[in-house]
C-alpha cells in the first residue's frame, strides 16, 4: 500500500509522452505549438530537504505541518524519532522530498549510533538543509558542531527558529538581531512556515518531479503503523519504559475487511513486559484501542489490530536485533 494524499486522486496509468501518441495530420501543428509552450514554461524544482536539529527541537511537528498529514510521531519525550521519516510535498511547480531525522546527540549505545548514522546520511544526501533550533535555546551551536562534523556541509543550510510562539517579544527582537538570516517559525501553529517554504523552494535545484504528485511518502504504510503503535505506547508509559520499546508489524493483510494487522511490541526485560501489559491486560488493550483509531485514520479503513508483547533482551545494544528492526549501524559498530 502506497501512502497518498487524500486531497488528490490516485495515480492512474503512466502518461504517454507527446511523441508516443499518434496524431492525425490536422492536429500536428497544434501539438508542436503546445510542446514549444511547454518547453518555454518555467522549469519545475525538486530535491531532498533534510530537517535536522537536536532532540525535541520540533522537527517531526514541522514535517507533519509541511506535508499536511501526520507521518512522524510526536512526543514530548526526546529521541522519539529513531530513523529518518520521508514525507513528500508537491505544489504547482515545486516538489520537496523531506527527511525528518533523529535528533543530533552523542551516542551512548548501538541504537543511538544507528540514529546518528541515519541523521548524518540524510545530511549528506540533502539538496537543502533546514536546521531546526528551539527559539528558547540560548546560543545554539552551528549545525556542523551540533552534528560533530569536522568539515562544512556542502548543501545550503536554512536556520529555522522554532517554537517562536512560546518566546517573549523581547526575545524575538534579540533573536532577529543575533540571527538576521534565520526564519522564525512555529511548527505547532504554522506561523512563519509559508515563508520558510518559499525560501526552501528558491534553494532547490531545477529538476523534474521525482515522484508522482499525489504520493506523500516513499515508505510503506506498515512502517507508519508500527510508528503509530510505538507513539501510543510512549504516550501511556512512564519514563523508564518507552526507550526500551520497539514495534514490529508481522502481518498486514489489506485485502481483508477490516484490514488485519498483527504487531508485536518488544521490550528488553520481563518487568517492562508486565508494566506494558498492565493489570489483567488493561494497559495493552488501551494501547491497542488508541493505536487502532490512529491507524484507521491513516489508512481510511477499518482495522483489526492483533497486538502482542514480547521480550527481546537488550535489543538496543544488539547489532542483529537492530538490523532486524531495520536500523543500520555504522560499519565500525556493525559486528
Image (cartoon, grey):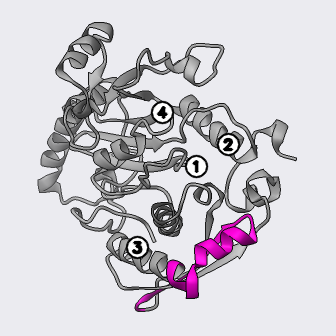
Q: Residue at x 41, y 90 (%)?
A: 258
Which disc, if any, is residue 82? 1
Q: Position of residue 203 (x, y in %)?
A: 34, 24
Task: Return the mark for residue 319.
Answer: none
**Is residue 185 something that shows in the picture?**
no
Residue at (23, 44) in percent of width and height: 91
Label 3 sits on residue: 295
Compare marks 4 and 3 and give the one earlier in the sequence.
4
For the residues labelled 2 and 1, the Cα–Cα distance comes to 8 Å
Point out the residue furthest to the right here.
335
Disc 3, SS: helix
Q: Residue furthest top?
A: 177
Circles 4 and 3: CB atoms closer than 8 Å: no
Magenta span of residues: 257-283
Report the front residue among 155 and 277: 277
Q: CA distance from mark 4 to mark 2?
A: 15 Å
Helix, strand, or loop for circle 2? Answer: helix
Confirm or deny contact between disc 4 and disc 1 (CB under 8 A). no
Whether residue 227 appears in this view of the structure is: yes
Which residue carries the number 4 mark?
Answer: 52
Q: Is residue 320 left or right of residue 176?
A: right
Numbered tag placed on residue 112 in the rendering: 2
- 194 relative to 239, above or below: above
Q: CA distance from mark 4 to mark 1?
A: 13 Å
User: Residue 67 placed where, x, y %?
Assistant: 31, 49
Residue 317, percent from left and from top: 78, 51
Indicate which label's residue lies in the foreground, 2 or 3.
2
185, above or below 65, in the image: above
Q: Helix, strand, or loop for circle 4? A: strand
Amino acid at each position: 500500500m502506497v501512502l497518498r494524499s487524500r486531497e488528490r486522486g490516485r495515480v492512474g496509468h503512466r502518461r504517454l509522452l507527446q511523441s508516443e501518441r499518434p496524431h492525425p495530420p490536422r492536429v500536428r501543428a497544434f501539438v508542436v505549438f503546445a510542446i514549444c509552450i511547454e518547453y518555454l514554461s518555467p522549469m519545475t524544482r525538486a530535491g531532498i530537504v533534510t530537517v535536522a536539529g537536536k532532540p525535541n527541537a520540533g522537527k517531526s511537528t514541522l514535517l507533519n505541518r509541511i506535508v499536511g498529514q501526520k507521518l512522524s510521531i510526536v512526543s514530548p519525550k526526546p529521541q522519539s524519532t529513531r530513523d529518518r521519516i520521508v514525507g513528500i510535498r508537491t505544489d504547482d511547480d515545486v516538489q520537496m522530498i523531506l527527511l525528518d531525522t533523529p535528533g543530533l546527540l552523542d551516542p551512548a549505545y548501538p541504537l543511538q549510533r544507528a540514529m546518528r548514522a541515519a541523521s548524518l546520511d540524510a545530511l549528506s544526501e540533502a539538496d537543502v538543509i533546514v536546521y531546526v533550533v528551539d527559539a528558547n535555546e540560548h546560543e545554539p551551536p552551528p549545525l556542523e558542531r551540533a552534528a560533530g562534523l569536522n568539515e562544512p556541509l556542502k548543501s545550503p543550510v536554512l536556520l529555522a527558529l522554532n517554537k517562536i510562539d512560546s518566546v517573549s517579544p523581547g526575545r524575538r527582537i534579540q533573536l532577529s538581531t543575533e540571527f538576521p538570516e534565520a526564519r522564525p517559525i512555529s511548527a505547532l501553529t504554522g506561523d512563519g512556515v509559508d515563508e520558510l517554504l518559499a525560501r526552501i523552494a528558491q534553494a532547490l535545484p531545477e529538476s523534474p518531479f521525482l515522484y508522482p504528485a499525489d504520493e506523500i511518502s516513499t515508505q510503506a504504510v506498515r512502517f507508519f503503523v508500527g510508528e503509530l503503535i510505538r507513539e501510543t505506547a510512549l504516550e501511556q508509559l512512564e519514563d523508564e519504559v518507552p526507550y526500551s520499546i520497539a514495534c514490529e508489524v508481522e502481518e498486514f493483510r489489506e485485502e481483508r475487511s477490516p484490514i488485519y494487522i498483527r504487531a508485536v511490541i518488544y521490550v528488553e526485560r520481563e518487568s517492562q513486559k508486565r508494566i506494558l501489559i498492565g493489570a489483567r491486560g488493561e494497559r495493552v488493550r488501551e494501547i491497542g484501542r488508541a493505536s487502532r483509531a490512529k491507524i484507521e485514520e491513516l489508512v481510511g479503513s477499518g482495522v483489526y489490530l492483533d497486538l502482542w508483547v514480547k521480550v527481546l533482551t537488550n535489543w538496543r545494544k544488539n547489532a542483529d536485533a537492530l538490523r532486524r528492526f531495520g536500523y543500520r549501524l555504522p560499519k565500525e559498530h556493525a559486528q
